Every structure is written in structure tokens, then in C-alpha cells.
Amino acid sequence: MAKAAREKKNQGAVSLDFAFFRSLTNFQKANKSALRRCYRDLTRKFLDFNDPGEDEEDAYLRLPQFEALETYVFLKEFAENRHVHQLFNEWAKNEGIFSGFVTTGLTDQGQATLLPYMELHGQDQYQAIFDNLKARSREYPNYIFALTMGTGKTILMATCIFYEFLLANKWRKDEKYCQNALVFAPDRTVLQSLKEIQTFDIAKVVPPEYVNFITSNIKFHFLDDTSVGLGTMDGSQFNIVISNTQKIILKKRKAQPSAADQLFSAKAGGLSEIYGELYELLGQDAPESDAELAVNARFQKLARLPRLGIYVDEAHHSMGAALAKDLGQDKSASALRTTIDELAKALRAKNSSVVACYNFTGTPYVGDQIMPEVVYAYSLKDAIANEYLKQPRYEVYQGEIKSSDFVRTVIKDFWENEGTNRREGMLPKLAFFGSTIEEVRDELRPSIEAVLGQLNIPTDRVLVNVGDDKLTTNDDIREFVQLDTERSEKQFIILVGKGREGWNCRSLFGVALYREPKSKIFVLQSTMRCLRSIGDIQETGHIYLSAANGDILEAELQQNFRVTRAELERKNSESDTVVVDVSAVPPPVVLKLARERVLYDTKRRAHAEKVDFGLTDERIDQYRVTVTTHRALNEAAVSSREITSELQQREFTRYTLIAELARYFQFDGLSPFDIELGIETSKDGPDKVLAAANLNNRVVYEVLIPALFRAFFKIESFSKTEIEDVELIRGYNEKSNVLPTFRFRAKEHLLAKRDYPDFLLTKGKSFHLDAYCFDSKPEHEFFKRVLSLDEVEKVYFTGMLVHGQSGFQVNYIDPESHTVRNYHPDFLVRTRTGKSIIVEVKNDWTFNDPVVQAKKEAATRLASHNLFQYEMLTVKQFNEFCEGLLQGATGVVGHSNVRDPAPTHIGPLL
């Protein structure tokens, strides 16, 4: 009955509004470990280096950037640059690269389900979506990454390119990796923002052992002038060409030349006499001027670069129909898309290719539809909710209001909320967008200066940039360029048309639009300018709009982001949070910690041990893949079948297996003959080894290679204990006596301040910061209870500064990625008997989490080297812990590996 109902539903209306990217993201998350085994070692190392971890403090990339990078790698290493329609076909049918995995669909509400896509949606729905995807396919794979403004698309692009070049260098014959990159900037914009790719510190996203290769081999080429030629060498590798699209776009004549044009061209001799061969090549589309010839020469240069990857930074500058055309989602292609198509043809003629085109935009939507080739999306709503952008605050002025009244109320409100409160040393700024230069000259500027005079604000804090020499001088342009620096004293910026120009100013805290602009999308683009994040906490972006512009913004948000203004506003649950300016309390607290440094050295054994691969039947069974059939989810299986032989994998011969194994030891002095001898004389025998490798290729990498390593090599470790001074707060400046300061957002009931009456008698025992912002009620409760004990000499909340502001941290190995991460325990307690205790407060349901246990193990090890005590407590254990302190007990709750503590030198201040 249920199946029949679904079939009847599937025969109904067919919807093309299917977010395939959500299913791809769900698949990657559900199969993360299995997918990583398909990746190359260098790829896994690159991903581990950039994984921000659960606290987002262990890497430079933020979570949206890293998730997009994971998708990029997934498309490269697992999908091998398949077109999106090919991916959808294999995913929906559970075929090809997806065979052996469980692929499930999503409900109409976007919720995960256990039902396969075809059973959930039916053949008609599948065919409609597949045809829609295939109709937009091009000669090259075309992928769209939709990350909202302010989430770091430029750095993400750079990271992807560095990854490509590292892999292309190591596997030079593998055609799925890009050897060169062409980065297109949005139309009619300056290239300053994209120059960050060249000035960016690559050590932040590239593992240290590969930084030298990147810096030594990458060649940057900026085409920001039509007179500048492209200086790439034909056939060269590792070029990054960054260009405005107009500097590359292939020039073609739109119409046949008239008889008069041909006559005058012939009289002048024309360019055809000079560039005869090029005219024969291009035919009727040959350039008619030196400027056109220079642009086309760049195109020809690009066509002589092998394996080109194209990165289109459309960002939020194009939306609607223009965006769809540029990203190849519309039947009528733009000049940009035509140029990319022609490049692909030209490269194919030279036995090369456009490896893929990667488009980075701010939204997955065009009008009321999802762009089909989106492979990853991070929404505006999520970016605000997760504090990657400022929290918008809308002030919409209803009813009739004069321009002068609008300006006055806006400036007064902005000044009351922001004033001269600097963030990262920069003054907050408010931008007024005028519709015309005349409006700015005759109405807007005089009104602003008049209001500033009434509020006793210097009028030299006004800056005008409207593209008119009479109103905007060269000095004004220089001031505009340095707005986002500590040197700038400007706060009120008057602009015309700068909303769509890629203007990035993190210290912009407000935007005001009074008159309705000609372009409705301009309202959305300009208001988003003030949402870029700044500082340690989520700040507020003030958006002031007339009623008409408020209606336009609401419509554009729904059309381009499928979200309303109300959904972007701060939720009621967050209304009790306050911004807290926190300052260090002198003198600085310094600990003396003993840290054990362990070095490992790999040495070749003089006589190799007999290899034992351990290929028992039980171990081999772990690599068999089976499918079980259940009549219901909660019933036992009625049948089971093995599908290991159906997996898409490599079939090894004896010699190709030896070659694959030898590849992993090529720099260790281990020859293929050594490996062959090791297999021949192994306890399992060569036939069993080969059979296991062909049963499941994972055996090669998870069993054979580690066993060979253990047989031929031994690891010697050397430990060294170092005593180091660790600052609880970094940033003290002895010369200037400037105290470190920080900003946090905290809930008032989880806030403890040094000057609160409750702490009048006990504040001398704590508060190395003048305020503690606790994350949870149990932390707050623990602090108050321990602080009130007479047996406690000092207690510090150390789990607050987690972004490099404190030196008190524990290094641990993440059990999933196997990378070193940092962990900041919650509390440091010192008793009057000299006992020093590191305390972590956890909820019951997270206590046995593998990551939590890895932190506990590392912290216990650090504590034992320093004769500290480490305790991981739940709320239920607070009483037992406090009673243990009162009784002077050593191990208070039994959740730590405790040594008898002795008085330890941890600095004179603790």
C-alpha cells in the first residue's frame, strides 16, 4: 500500500527544484571515514592540516571553507571530475562510484530518509532532473560553490589551487589535477580583493613541508590593464592568471562589416597585412584594432597552457539572470561563459583540456529555482546564526519622512549605538548611498554635515566617493582605500554606486538608503556591505531603509536567499546575551610547566623480520561488503548477500601489487625485490596476499603496507622534558603598561564579574580577567562552589581564552583525523596544601565521546609530568570533589590517573 501510494504520488507533478547538493553533503558526512580511505595520502594530510576541529581553533580555515574544500576534494578524488548529471545518475541509481555505499534521498522538506531516491521520488522525477542537469552540461565539468558573502571565498579558491598544484606535481600524468589556474573576477570590478591570493600567507593552509614548493614554483600574472600582455611560457605549469573578465574575453564582431568599413579598412592597409596568418586563422572574427588584438593574444596564450582549471569569482556581484548566464545555468550564455567554452575547445585542439570550471557565488538560487550544478552551499542565514557575519539590525522608516529627517535620525541612532568605539583599532563607519551625484551634492552631504554640527561631531569625518572630480579628490580616493585601517579617522561615507563593486570594509557598521535606486538588486548588495565580521564576537550591522527600500530588500532576500528579514534577526533565545569587554587583571599569572617532547626516528632493520600480514579469516571478513534485507527496520534480516565482488576497484596481478606497494617505500631504500621477497617468505604466502588485495583494495593500504613497514623498519623514540613559562593570558606589554583586552558575548546569568558584590570577599582568590563568561550553568556553579571553599587558595577559569590568547593548553591527537589539536581545560585550582588540580566540567552524555576521552588522556599525561592532578567531572560529582578538597584527599572522584601530588613550582603568583 505504501509503495503504491508513493508510485501514485510520483506520477503527479514533477519538480525541478531538487537540491542535489544537500544529498551530496549528507553522503559525505555519512561516509567520511570510507571516503578518506579512497583519497591519496597527500590529500589526507592536506585535509587534516586544514581541519578546524570542533572548536574551530586548530586551523586557519573556518568550518564553511573546510566543508567546501572537502567537497572539492570529493569531486576530485572520489568522483574523478564527473559532470554533475553523471554524479546524480550514479547516486540516484546507486551505481558506479556509489555502489557499495548506501545512498538515500531527501523528503520534500529536506529531511533525511532511509528510502533510496528512486523509490522515494520515482522514475519521472529522476528523468526530469537528470535531463535538466544534462541540458546545462558543457564540454568540461562545471561546479558551483555557493558560500554567502563574508565566508572567505577568495581564501578558499587559493587553498583549492594550492591543493591542485601539489597533487599535479606529484602525479604529473594524472589528468584530473590542474597544472594551471585562471581566476576570473566579476565584471567591471577592480582586482584588489583577488590580489589577496598572492599576498596571502600560504603557510596557513599548506602543510609546512610543502610550503617551499608552492612559493618556489607558483607564478602570478595579473591582467588589470588592457595594455599588459600575458607573460606565461607556452606549456609551462603552476601559473595563476588573475584577470578581469574583459581582459580575456574573446572579441568577436557582432555584425558583418559594411561596404564602407571594408573600403576604408582596405585603404588604410588594415591589420590584415600585418597579421595575415592570424586573420586566416580567425577568419571573419579577426580583431580590428590593436586593443582587440591584445585581448585575443591573451586568449591564445591561455590556450597554450596545459590542464587549465578555471575559477570564476562571481561572488555576490551578479545575481538573477546575469548570474545564471555567467555560471552556465542559462541557455543563452554570457560573454564570460562563451570565452570559457572557447578556451575548452582551443585546449582540446592542443590535446589538453579545461580540467573543470569552479564557480564561487553567494547564493544557490536564481529567482525561484536552485541552480542545478550547485555542489555545496552555505546560506546567509547559517552564516549569521553561526556568527561568521555581523547580526543585522533593521530600521525601516514607515510613512512619509523627509530626507533631512531620515539623515538626522539615522546618524543619532548610529552614534548612540557605535560612537567612536573602535574594533581592532578601527573606527566604526556608516555609509550613505545616494542615487545620483546631484543628490549627494545638493541634498545628502549638506544634511549630514548639518546633523554632525548639531551633535558636535567634526565634519572632517565625512568622506565622499562618487566618481566626480569636483566632489571626490585624489586625497579622498586615498582615504577611501585606507578606510579599513587604524589610520583612518573617517566615519561617515557618502557613496554612489559602490554597493556592487566588491568593496570589502569590515569596520563598516551601518548602511543607509533613502531614495529607491534604479536597480532593485542594488538594495540587497549594498546593505550586505556592513555585515562582514570583525573582532572576537558577533557585532551588529545597522541597516537603515526607507519603507520602499525595506520592501525591496524583503523581496530580494526571498528571491536570492529564500529567507526573510525576520529570519535573519536575532532569536529570542539570544536576547539575554550581552557584549562584555574583558580586561586582564595584573599582575600576569605565569605557570612553570614541564612538557615532554618526544622525537621518533625510523631506522631500517639490519635483518628484516618475517612478515606476518595476519590475514586470518576473521580479519578478511572485515573487508567483505554485504547487503541485508529486512521486512521492517526493527525486524531481523530475512536474507543477506555479499557484494564485495561488485565493488569498483583495481584488479592486481602479482607484479602490479608489488609495484603499488613499492611506490610507498620509494624514498626509504626499499626496492621492489625486497618487497617481493618479503611477500614470498611471509607467513601468509603470496597467493593469500594477492587474493586479499583483490578482495578489497583497502587491504593493501590498511594491512599490507603497515605490516611491511613493521617488518623492515623499527621506530626509536627519544624523549626530552623541557620547563617552560606559560602565560595564562598572552599579550602583556611591560613597556606600555597596556593590558590585554577582549570582547565576548555572554548570557547575563552565566556572567561573573570581579566587581560583583557576591565576590567582594573572594575576588582575590581568582579573576585573572575582570570577568568570566561561562559557557554553561555547570561551569558557573562549579566556579562559585569551589571559590567559596576556604581550602582553595586560587581558582582560575581557563576555558575562556581559546583562540591563541592563552598559553595554557593541552596538545592531543584527534582520534578521527589523527592530527594534533589544542585543548583548553576549564579550570585551574590550587589548594592551600599545595595541591594543583586541572578540572574539566562535562555533561553526562558527552563524557564517553572519543574526542573527550582523547583530551582527558593528553591532559592526564601533562598533569602527571607536573605532579598535577587532572579531574573530569560531571555535575553529579561536584559534591564528592568539594568534599575531597575539604578532607585533603588525593584522588577525589576516581576519573583520573592520579599520582600523589607534591608541592610543585608553578610560579609565584598561583
Image: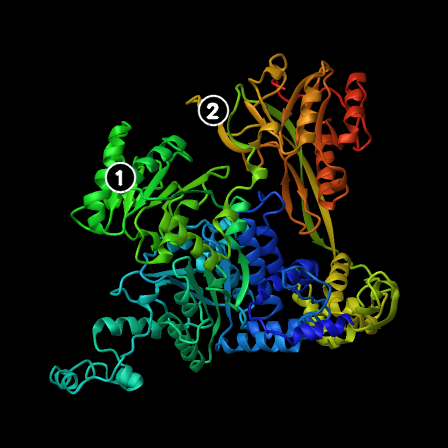
Q: Position of residue 645 (x, y in %)?
A: 77, 75
In the displayed image of the protein, which residue is found farthest to the top? Answer: 761
State the image quarter where residue 675 is shown.
bottom right
Query: What amino acid type should be assigned to the residue bearing mark 1?
Result: Ser
State the mark number for residue 404.
Answer: 1
Q: Is residue 32 above or below residue 757?
A: below
Q: Position of residue 519 (x, y in %)?
A: 33, 58
State the mark number for residue 739.
Answer: 2
Q: Is residue 577 above or below residue 311?
A: above
**Which quadrant is the N terminus positioned in?**
bottom right
* Residue drawn at the location 66% of the way across and 58% of the way down: 29
Work out whether residue 168 can be spotted: yes
- The one nearer the camera, 61 or 390, is 390
CA separation, marks 2 and 1?
A: 43 Å
Instruction: Determine whether, in the image, residue 639 is placed left or right of residue 744.
Output: right
Q: Residues within 10 Å of mark 2 (few under 14, many from 20)?
A: some
Identify the secondary structure beneath mark 2.
loop
* Foreground tag (2 vs 1): 1
* Colour theme: rainbow
